[in-house]
Image (cartoon, helix red, strand yellow):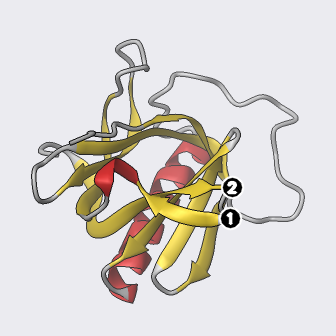
Amino acid sequence: LDGEWVVRVRAVVLTRDDSSGGWVPLGGGGLSHVVICKGRSHEGRGRREYIIRGERLRDRAPVLECAVQRGLVYNKVNPIFHHWRVEDRKFGLTFQSPADAISFEKGLQTVIDKLDRGSDSPSSSTPEEGDTEDDGQAVSTVTFCHFSVSIL
C-alpha cells in the first residue's frame, strides 16, 4: 500500500452475507490497512483512478480493491462501522476508532467532490447532463470491487 494516498486507516474489512443476515470478515479477517489512493486497478485497463484498497496487517495479503466513481452511497451505521454497496454486494469497514472513521469519510468525500467537479477525472468519463441528485446528498459510485480470499 505504498504510494500516493488520500487517507490511510486501520479497519476490519467486511462483506454482507445475506444468507445469514450478518457481516463477515473478508480474507480470513483481521485488521487491515485501508487506503484511498490514486492508482491503477486490476480491472481498470491501465487507467489511473481512485481506489479503496485493503491489505491485511499480519501478512500484507490484499483483501479489497474498489474503484471509486461518482454515485456511491456511503452509509454511516455508527461511529466505527460504515458500509457501501456495489451492485449486489455490500462492503463494510469496522474502524479502530471514531477518528479513523471520520478521516476515512472525509478522504472519500474529498475524492467524491473532485470527481463531481470534474477537476480530477481519473476514469476519464464525462458527467452526463441528467446525472445529478435532487436531494443535495453527497453520493459517489463504486463501479466494481473485487477481493481476494486466502484459504489456509
Q: Horizontally, is 2 left or right of 33 in the view?
A: left
Q: Quadrant of residue 21?
A: bottom right
Q: Horizontally, is 116 left or right of 12 in the view?
A: right
Measured in 3D between alpha carbons, the distance from the residue under mark 2 to the one under mark 1, in whole angstroms, is 5 Å
Q: Nearer the viewer, residue 12 or 151?
A: 151
Residue closest to the far front = 152
- Disc 1 on helix, strand or loop? loop
Q: Local crowd at mark 1 within 10 Å, few (<14), some, or many (≥20)?
A: few
- The disc placed on residue 18 is 2
Q: Quadrant of residue 76?
A: bottom right
- Give the x, y percent position of residue 62: 25, 42
Tag 1 residue: 21
- The disc placed on residue 39 is none
Q: Is residue 119 above or below residue 110?
A: above
Q: As shown in the figure, which amino acid type bears the numbered disc 2?
A: Asp
The answer to the question of whether label 2 and label 1 lie on touching residues, with beta carbons closer than 8 A, is yes
Residue at 55 percent of width and 43 percent of height: 115
Q: Nearer the viewer, residue 149 or 129?
A: 149
Q: Horizontally, is 58 left or right of 21 in the view?
A: left
Q: Locate the C terminus and report the quarter of the image it occupies.
A: top left
- Give the x, y percent position of residue 64: 37, 44
Residue at 34 percent of width and 14 percent of height: 46
Residue at 26 percent of width and 69 percent of height: 10
Q: As shown in the figure, which amino acid type bears the numbered disc 1?
A: Gly
- Tally of marks: 2
- Give the x, y percent position of residue 51: 39, 41
- Give the x, y percent position of residue 82: 53, 71
- Disc 2 on helix, strand or loop? loop
Q: Local crowd at mark 2 within 10 Å, few (<14), some, or many (≥20)?
A: few
Residue at 80 percent of width and 65 percent of height: 136
